[in-house]
């Protein structure tokens, strides 16, 4: 069943001079199940479509994604400021797809959109107005409403709904001023599916380092389709056919995926990502997130104090854990509306951040060791 395409008229009007061009760049790969809905949502925007440029970058899809995109462009190219289709000769990854779309863009603002995210009718207009009224924001994202039963996704939606919250990352359904991209650079093409993860964290960290912030605006809602999770993730074994069915992801499955994610964090590509994300953050945020590396030792001290009947050790360990927990709670507090979600998400954040900080520290030591061994080798080779 296809999307309901709105009835609009193609006029020869041009974009008014006082309205900026918005470029929407969409990265696709085997996205035939969702791309029709994503493109149809662009026709429904309250922001004039004559001021919207649409660029689709396909990573050599093996289904009929390209055919669907070509059909859409042939039918609706006159409705938009411009439409472009870029087809890669192989799957170079989501970061290169986004970068090629950005480099081909002419808009003053860019919307980075995944091929399974449906923008609400006022999304582009609302994100633009938010950036214009908040010049120190470098990336604004709409809040994604998942069409699955994933517990953590549902909890995040409830906590973020109706609020503006600062985050590190800059990911799907994000609007970024062109000047910000000129300042911080493009997405890191060594990161991102199918090679690694967290390219959005690394990109967001650079935005923060440049003196701007990344926010999720919970007053702007977009729909994230779980019917076909981004096929780029197949290369990371993060999805399969059973997982992609709507409503089948339950708490136990979400917990299993979360544990697998934590273990994957110690693999080489992920260690590198955690290290450079922490390195790119401004000093105050770097110190804040680096302190989470003490969570593991704090638990160890607490347990040692309990088993050895040492009250001082127990007090020190528990105090450190409480301090870190309260710090994480700042990002997910929602009392009294969603106490349960706040407690669970804060606990998840504490565990995740402690793992990321520990992994980043290990990667840092690994880098120092490699430099030391390289220096010894060069000196030995010289003599």
Image: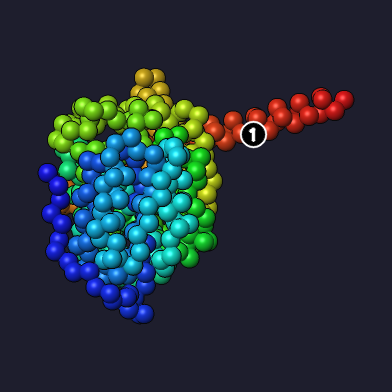
- Please say if 328 is above or below 352: below
Quick one: SS at disc 1?
helix
Near-viewer residue (284 or 239)? 239
Please indicate, yes or no, whether residue 166 appears anywhere in the rendered image: no
- What residue appears at the point 36 percent right and 80 percent down from the top-left corner? 17
Q: Which residue is mark 1?
A: 368
Q: Is residue 207 above or below residue 360?
A: below
The x and y percentages for residue 283 are: 53, 53
Q: Quadrant of residue 64?
A: top left
Residue in the picture at 45% in, 34% down: 195
Is the residue marked by circle 1 packed among few (<14), some (14-19), or many (20+) residues within 10 Å?
few
- Left or right: where 228 falls relative to 267: left
Determine which quarter of the picture holds residue 254: top left
| Residue closer to the observer: 381 or 362 | 381
Q: The C terminus lies in which quarter of the figure? A: top right
Q: Position of residue 6 (x, y in %)?
A: 15, 61
Q: Quadrant of the N terminus?
A: top left
Residue 47 place in picture, x, y as percent: 25, 69
Residue in the image at 52% along x and 55% along y: 185
The location of residue 304, given as percent across then percent down, is: 40, 23
What residue is rendered at 82% in x and 25% in y?
Answer: 381
Residue extending farthest top: 307
């Amino acid at each position: 069943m296809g999307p309901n395409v709105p009835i609009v008229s193609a006029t020869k009007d041009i974009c008014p001079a006082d309205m900026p061009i918005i470029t929407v760049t969409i990265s696709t790969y085997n996205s035939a199940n969702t791309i029709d809905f994503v493109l149809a949502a662009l026709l429904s925007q309250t922001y004039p479509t004559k001021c919207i440029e649409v660029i689709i970058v396909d990573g050599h899809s093996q289904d009929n994604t390209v055919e669907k995109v070509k059909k859409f462009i042939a039918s609706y190219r006159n409705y938009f400021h411009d439409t472009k289709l870029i087809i890669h000769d192989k799957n170079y990854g989501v970061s290169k797809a986004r970068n090629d779309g950005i480099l081909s863009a002419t808009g003053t603002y860019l919307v980075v959109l995944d091929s399974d995210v449906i923008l609400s009718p006022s999304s582009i207009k609302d994100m633009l107005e938010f950036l214009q009224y908040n010049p120190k924001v470098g990336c604004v994202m709409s809040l994604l409403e998942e069409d699955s039963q994933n517990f953590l996704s549902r909890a995040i939606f409830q906590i973020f709904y109706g609020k503006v919250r600062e985050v590190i990352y800059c990911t799907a359904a994000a609007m970024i001023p062109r000047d910000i991209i000129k300042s911080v650079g493009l997405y890191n093409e060594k990161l991102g599916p199918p090679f690694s993860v967290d390219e959005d964290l690394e990109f967001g960290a650079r935005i923060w380092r440049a003196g701007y912030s990344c926010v999720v605006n919970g007053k702007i809602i977009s729909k994230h389709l779980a019917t076909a999770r981004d096929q780029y993730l197949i290369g990371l074994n993060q999805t399969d056919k059973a997982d992609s069915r709507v409503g089948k992801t339950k708490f136990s499955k979400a917990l299993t995926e979360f544990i697998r994610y934590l273990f994957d964090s110690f693999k080489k590509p992920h260690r590198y990502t955690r290290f450079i994300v922490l390195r790119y953050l401004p000093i105050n945020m770097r110190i804040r997130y680096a302190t989470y590396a003490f969570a593991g030792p704090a638990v160890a001290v607490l347990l040692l104090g309990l088993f050895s009947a040492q009250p001082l050790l127990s007090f020190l360990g528990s105090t450190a854990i409480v301090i870190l927990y309260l710090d994480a709670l700042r990002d997910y507090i929602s009392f009294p509306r969603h106490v349960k979600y706040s407690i669970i998400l804060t606990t998840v954040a504490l565990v995740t951040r402690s793992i990321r900080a520990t992994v980043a520290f290990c990667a840092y030591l690994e880098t120092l060791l490699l430099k030391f061994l390289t220096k010894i080798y060069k000196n030995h080779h010289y003599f």
